[in-house]
Image (cartoon, helix red, strand yellow):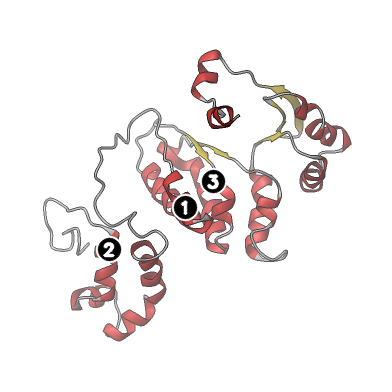
Amino acid sequence: AILTGYAAGNSVLQETTIPRLWDLLRNPTRELVRACEYANTRQFLDQTRLLRNALGELVTGTLAGLFDDFTNIEVDWRAPIQSFSLSRLDGLGDEAVGIALLCMNSWGRGLREIAEPGDLRIVVRDEVWKQMRLGTAAVASFDADLRLSRGMAGKGGDIQFCNLHKPSDLLSVGDADSQAAMIAKDLLELADIKILGAQKPRVARELDSMLGLGPIAQDLVSGWAMQDKGRALWCIGDATYKVQTVLHPLEKKLYYTNEAIESAG
């Protein structure tokens, strides 16, 4: 409120940035300390240390340079399709990408909460495992995103797609009996539709232990689905279906991702 001018009653609010917020938390004004109901500046600094450290990672740590200034491109938030790429962060490691995913998910949730009624969206989440390994808070945030999506866009709800490579993405988030592991295991149960692509026998057995597929469905995942592209076992409620999706020629051209492999060969 101080940085945007809201606290001063300005008629036009200003955008702010994470570095400015971080600087204000490190050097709080008397007004900020009083508004947050702390006894003194020392208590404010002690109680907000974790928050300052987290913001500091975005300013000077792993993600330095990403949040340094105002957005310098025009973005149409009402466009029918919006895609966010984190490919430029790949060189910083999985933790950096995971933190960026967490930030983007939280921001995206806020944006969807104020969407106009009827503005329904399909939200596709990729590289979920990188966020899941950041700890209990990150897993809980992801779980909340999926649950709260039902009330988005004037209660119409959004459709969420979450892409995982294998069951161990959910099982490796923490110790076996940890809170993070328990939340992660429940995520599969919460999904209304599960699309199980081709997997090796060992992974198919893991899916069977988690979902109770049975021997026939397990063999379909490790056998039939492996024999051609687009094949998967669709679990819808208690029913399972063998499904093979076929791309339209235009879709195949748009989503073909093997150019680098072909040029190298």
Q: Quadrant of the N terminus?
A: bottom left
Q: Tell me the crowding category of disc 3: few under 14, some 14 to 19, or many 20 or more residues within 10 angstroms, Cα based.
A: some
Percent across and percent down for residue 129 are 59, 51
Q: Tell me the crowding category of disc 2: few under 14, some 14 to 19, or many 20 or more residues within 10 angstroms, Cα based.
A: some
Most foreground residue, 124 or 89: 89
Q: Which residue is mark 2?
A: 19
* 24 on left or right of 102: left
Furthest residue in direction right, as rendered: 215
Q: Nearer the viewer, mark 1 or mark 2?
A: 1
Q: Nearer the viewer, mark 1 or mark 3?
A: 1
Q: Which residue is mark 1?
A: 91
Q: Which residue is mark 3?
A: 146
Residue 2 showing in the rendered view: yes
Taking the spot 28% from the left edge, 57% from the top edge, the residue there is: 68
Specify the amino acid type for callout 1: Gly
Does 178 appear above or below 256?
Answer: below
Specify the amino acid type for callout 3: Leu
The disc, 1 or 3, on the residue closer to the chain's N-terminal end is: 1
Specify the amino acid type for callout 2: Pro
Taking the spot 29% from the left edge, 67% from the top edge, the residue there is: 22
Does 30 appear above or below 164?
Answer: below
Percent across and percent down for residue 243 are 71, 23
The disc, 3 or 2, on the residue closer to the chain's N-terminal end is: 2
